[in-house]
Each structure stands twice: as C-alpha cells, then as structure tokens.
Image (spheres, grey):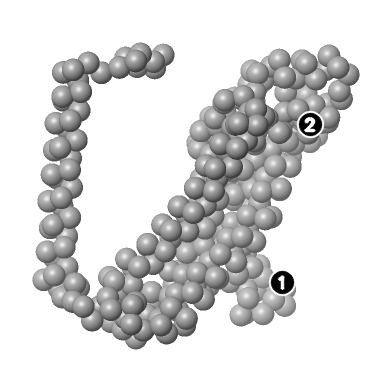
C-alpha cells in the first residue's frame, strides 16, 4: 500500500528490513549478554541482591511505596496547577490584543528557556529567605513551583499549536452563526483541539513525573529515586534497586500513556476531533498558523 509520505516496500526491501531487524536483535542480544556478564563478575546477579524485594516487605513499606507516593504527590499537584495555567497562557498567546499577547508571550518564552532544575533551586531559595515555609515541606514546594512554571509554559505552546492545527473553516463557521470570539474559542476550537493536543500533553505529564527526581537529587525531596540511597545503605544492592525503581517508573508512565491512548480513541470516536495531531516539539509553531484563530480573546 502506497502512502503520501512513502512507498510501500517491495520484496527486496522487505527482505533487507528482515535482515536489518535480525542484525539488530543479534547485536542487542550480544550487548545484553555483555552487560549481564559484567554484572555477574561484580556479583550483582547474586540472589541476595534481588531477593529482598520479594522476601522483605519492609523494603516496600518503608522505602519504595512512600517514595512513590511522594513522587505522585509532587507530580499530581504540579499537573493540576500547570494544566489550567498552561491552557490560559496558550489562549492568551492567541489573543488579538497586544497588551495580552505580549506579556503572555514573554512569560512563556522566559520560563521555557530556563532549565527546570534552576527554577527549582530558585524556588527553594526564595521560600527559604522570604517565607516561613517549614524546611520539611520546602523541597516539595520548590519542586512543584519549578515544575509548574516550566511545564505551564510548554503546555501553553501545546495548546496554541493544537488550536492552530484546526482548519480555518471552524472559525469561519462559528462566525457565520454569530458566535463571539470567546464563544468560538471555548465552545468550538478548544473541544476539537483536545484530541490533537492529547499525545503531546501526555508526553509532558510523563516529563513532569520524571522531573520530580531532580528534587530528590538536589533538594532532599523524599521521592522514589532518592530512596535508592537508603535502600542501598541497608541492603548493599545499588544496581538491583535502580533496576526495580526504573521498572516502577515504567509501570506508572505506561499506565498513564495507556489511559491517555484509550481516552484519545474515545474522543476520536465521538467525532470531536479533526484527525490532526500536535507533535511533542511545538517550539517552531508559526504564531500566524492557518487555523485563522489569531482573533481569540
């Protein structure tokens, strides 16, 4: 079957693809064997390194589960604040009023340009010097602050790109039936743009969860990855602990993306989408895109 983007491979191309796939599988297997061999030489595959995760429930109740809950708490709080804030900023960037579009654009570009770790460090220092926030919860406040500022700016660009991905006819039809600018945005464009934005939004939510680990590394937040130090100190199994923590991250993020895929399929079946999809990197979206929505309030 031929696509607009590429021609379907013929018999020779299919044979080459099978050969390339076979070579990749062999090379991957050799690399895995090499890594496992090195681990075996360093006694990292010994049973006493791995069995505590099965036989000792304390490793879960004292370290892993509390760390996971702290990660989820920081991530969920940041998501709950960053999503609506990012949506408002994205709509503000589409405004035809310069006094709205200019400051919002400056805010978005400023916080997108600063590393999220630096935002966390700034937040921690500000809370230390100018507030009476307890040192016990200050790392959580700083992590959430950094995540919200950075990810709200990124989500704003995702929202803007999602709205701009819609056909111009959507705006024209809304105007034809007498809808005002605000009504066009909130009742016509945003609901249809959700399906286009969803893949990029989910990717950003996964980034939020993973970036909580930065707070554990430098600010002392008792999140999941930081539990590696405590578990390794008690059980002397650093590699095994990191593998288990990585598997937990994979399971959580896979659950999130699976739910998002199900939700996206439901939204597309409800015929509220246009088939457009916003890419994860929206940095190069043209502010004057073809959707004809530059007149949003």
At x 60%, y 66%, the residue is 73
At x 41%, y 82%, the residue is 57
Q: Secondary structure at mark 1?
A: helix
Dividing the picture into quadrants, the one containing residue 132 is bottom right
Q: Is residue 235 above or below residue 223?
A: below
| Numbered mark located on residue 240 in the image | none
Residue with the mark numbered 1: 130
Q: Is residue 66 above or below residue 192?
A: below
Taking the image as shown, residue 206 lies to the left or right of residue 167, namely: left
How would you rate the neighbour count of disc 1 (Cα within 10 Å): few for under 14, some for 14-19, many for 20 or more? few
**Residue 110 visible (yes or no):** no
Taking the image as shown, residue 116 lies to the left or right of residue 234, namely: right
Nearest to the observer: residue 136 or residue 267: 267
**Residue 210: x, y in percent?**
48, 58
Distance between the alpha carbons at the discs numbered 2 and 1: 42 Å
Q: Secondary structure at mark 2?
A: helix
At x 16%, y 25%, the residue is 16
**Residue 32: x, y in percent?**
17, 55
**Residue 115: x, y in percent?**
52, 52
**Residue 174 visible (yes or no):** yes
Task: Give the mark count.
Answer: 2
How would you rate the neighbour count of disc 2 (Cα within 10 Å): few for under 14, some for 14-19, many for 20 or more? few
At x 74%, y 42%, the residue is 88
Q: Earlier in the sequence, mark 2 or mark 1?
A: 1
**Residue 250: x, y in percent?**
41, 57
Residue with the mark numbered 2: 187
Taking the image as shown, residue 80 lies to the left or right of residue 182, namely: left
């Amino acid at each position: 079957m031929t696509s607009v983007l590429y021609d379907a491979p013929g018999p020779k191309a299919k044979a080459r693809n099978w050969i390339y796939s076979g070579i990749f599988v062999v090379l991957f297997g050799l690399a895995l064997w090499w890594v496992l061999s090195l681990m075996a030489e360093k006694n990292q595959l010994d049973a006493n390194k791995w069995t505590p995760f099965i036989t000792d429930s304390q490793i879960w109740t004292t370290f892993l589960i509390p760390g996971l809950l702290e990660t989820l708490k920081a991530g969920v709080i940041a998501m709950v604040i960053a999503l609506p804030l990012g949506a408002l900023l994205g709509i503000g960037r589409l405004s035809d009023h310069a006094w709205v579009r200019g400051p919002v654009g400056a805010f978005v570009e400023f916080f997108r340009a600063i590393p999220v770790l630096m935002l966390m460090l700034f937040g921690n220092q500000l809370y230390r010097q100018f507030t009476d926030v307890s040192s016990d919860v200050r790392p959580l406040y700083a992590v959430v602050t950094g995540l919200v500022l950075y990810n709200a700016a990124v989500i704003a660009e995702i929202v803007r790109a999602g709205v701009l991905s819609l056909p111009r006819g959507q705006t024209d039809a809304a105007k034809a039936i007498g809808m005002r600018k605000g009504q066009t945005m909130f009742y016509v464009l945003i609901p249809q743009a959700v399906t286009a934005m969803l893949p990029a939004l989910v990717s950003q939510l996964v980034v939020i969860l993973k970036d909580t680990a930065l707070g554990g590394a430098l600010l002392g937040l008792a999140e999941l990855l930081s539990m590696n130090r405590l578990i390794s100190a008690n059980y002397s199994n650093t590699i095994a602990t990191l593998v288990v923590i990585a598997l937990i991250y994979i399971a959580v993020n896979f659950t999130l993306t699976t739910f998002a895929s199900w939700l996206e399929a439901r939204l597309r079946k409800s015929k509220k989408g246009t088939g457009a999809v916003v890419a994860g990197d929206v940095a190069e979206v043209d502010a004057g895109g073809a959707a004809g929505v530059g007149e949003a309030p």
